Image (spheres, helix red, strand yellow):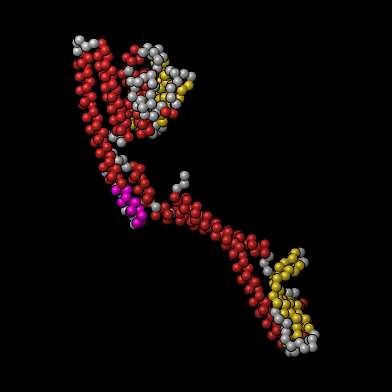
């Protein structure tokens, strides 16, 4: 993708090239016409000069002039009966062979007559012209030089003056890139004398104000919704627990209570996950720190050690580096924790989990059957294995959302009966 200055210069260059193509033939015909006109004037002036010389001494001039100047032919014409006017002027192009150059050269020739002292003379004057090919090459060379100088001038203007004129726009772009809606005040725009840039800054200020209001409202709504849902869910869960502990309930009633309790727990998990997703999308996690991935993996494995032992899973963890990634520590724990718990949950009893930490990536692999849905849908919301109805289908979606938030790459592949989740980051 090209920047605006490059595109503008392309248009200028295209216009200059078009004008150059048109100017070469136009310049050729105009200059050729001016040269011929100048040669014609010179030939006519020479004719007048020879006429004056003939008036003074026509006999000597008649013999001397053709020998002294090969471009002049002068001869006496016998007057015909009834002839009163001299021959009219006739100018035309012709070619003559020049022995010294051994080539034919273009000439402009004047054929006319002179009546001097009652005598009629035939006069032919010629003057060499620039060859058409030389003329075209010269004009093309000159025009090409002008064209290149014009391109050079446009390039310099484009790089210096235009860039200086567009500097306020570049400054605005830099401010927008650094601006964070969740924590920054209204930007302080650079002063400019360009009307369009002032209008842009005013419209951006209005847009940012509106988005700040919307952001604050969404943040407040998310916090209130999460809090208001947690309270009744906690009450329902407590009441179901009391009912479950009651004596004398038939087994069928206890089964109903158990299913209701599980549904409430799933609803609480779903509320927590959706709230977290909304907070991530709204960038409500502001504070970023250097998170050591190796230490975080160690802590997650200790936290989930009991689940690993319960399913008799074979865990292999190798660490060849101790990378640190700049991100929110809470979100980093959610991202890696979801990947680790996903591997534990979906690995069959007695299966294998392999975690390998490199300087630029983390690979979490687990054994298991292939997905019951397309691979490209694995990070979509509410996509889950039908065999695990208790899952929310949001864990991997949250992990992918966090990875996108911090410019990390989270990918999935299935090879050799192994599920592979790979988180990659740039090494500073």
| x 20%, y 23%: residue | 235
Please identify the quarter of the rendering in which residue 252 is found: top left
Q: Nearer the viewer, residue 189 or 280?
A: 280
Main SS of residues in magenta: helix
* Residue 208 seen: yes
In the rendering, at what x and y percent does residue 346 appear? 39, 19
Would you say 298 lies left or right of 251 here? right
x, y percent for residue 268: 27, 24
What residue sits 61% from the left and 65% below the top?
A: 28
Q: Image height check: is 194 above or below 407?
A: below
Corner quadrant of residue 146: bottom right
Q: Is residue 262 above or below residue 408?
A: above
Which portion, as a residue range, is magenta? 194-206
Is 398 on the left-hand or right-hand side of 62? left
In the image shown, does 401 or 132 lie closer to the viewer?
Answer: 401
* Rendered view: 129 above or below 277: below
Q: Residue at the spot x=21%, y=13% of the render?
A: 245
């Amino acid at each position: 993708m090209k920047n605006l200055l490059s595109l503008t210069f392309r248009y200028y260059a295209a216009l200059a090239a078009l004008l150059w193509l048109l100017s070469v033939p136009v310049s050729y015909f105009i200059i050729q016409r001016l040269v011929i006109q100048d040669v014609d004037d010179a030939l006519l002036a020479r004719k007048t000069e020879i006429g004056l010389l003939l008036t003074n001494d026509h006999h000597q001039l008649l013999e001397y002039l053709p020998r002294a100047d090969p471009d002049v032919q002068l001869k006496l014409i016998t007057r015909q009966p009834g002839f009163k006017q001299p021959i009219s002027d006739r100018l035309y192009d012709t070619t003559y062979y020049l022995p010294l150059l051994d080539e034919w050269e273009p000439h402009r020739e004047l054929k006319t007559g002179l009546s001097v002292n009652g005598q009629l003379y035939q006069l032919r004057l010629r003057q060499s012209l620039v060859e058409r090919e030389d003329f075209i090459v010269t004009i093309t060379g000159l025009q090409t030089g002008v064209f290149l100088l014009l391109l050079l001038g446009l390039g310099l203007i484009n790089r210096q003056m235009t860039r200086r004129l567009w500097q306020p726009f570049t400054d605005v772009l830099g401010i927008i890139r650094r601006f964070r809606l969740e924590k920054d005040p209204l930007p302080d725009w650079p002063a400019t004398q360009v009307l369009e840039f002032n209008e842009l800054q005013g419209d951006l200020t209005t847009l940012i104000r509106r988005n700040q209001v919307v952001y604050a409202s969404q943040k407040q709504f998310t916090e209130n919704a999460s809090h208001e849902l947690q309270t009744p869910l906690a009450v329902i869960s407590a009441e179901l627990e009391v009912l479950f502990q009651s004596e004398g309930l038939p087994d069928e009633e206890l089964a109903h209570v158990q299913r209701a309790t599980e549904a409430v727990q799933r609803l609480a998990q779903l509320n927590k996950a959706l709230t977290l997703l909304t907070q991530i999308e709204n960038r409500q996690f502001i504070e970023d720190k250097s998170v050591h991935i190796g230490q975080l993996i160690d802590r997650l494995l200790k936290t989930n050690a009991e689940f690993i032992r319960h399913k008799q899973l074979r865990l292999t963890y190798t660490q060849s580096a101790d990378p640190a990634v700049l991100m929110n520590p809470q979100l980093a724990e959610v991202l890696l924790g979801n990947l680790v718990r996903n591997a534990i949950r979906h690995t069959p009893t007695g299966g294998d989990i392999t975690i390998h930490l490199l300087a630029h990536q983390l690979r979490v692999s687990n054994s298991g059957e292939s997905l019951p849905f397309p691979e490209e849908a694995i990070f979509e919301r509410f996509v889950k294995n039908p065999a695990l109805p208790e899952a929310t289908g949001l864990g991997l979606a949250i992990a992918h959302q966090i990875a996108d938030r911090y410019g990390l790459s989270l990918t999935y592949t299935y090879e050799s009966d192994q599920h592979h989740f790979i988180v990659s980051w740039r090494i500073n």
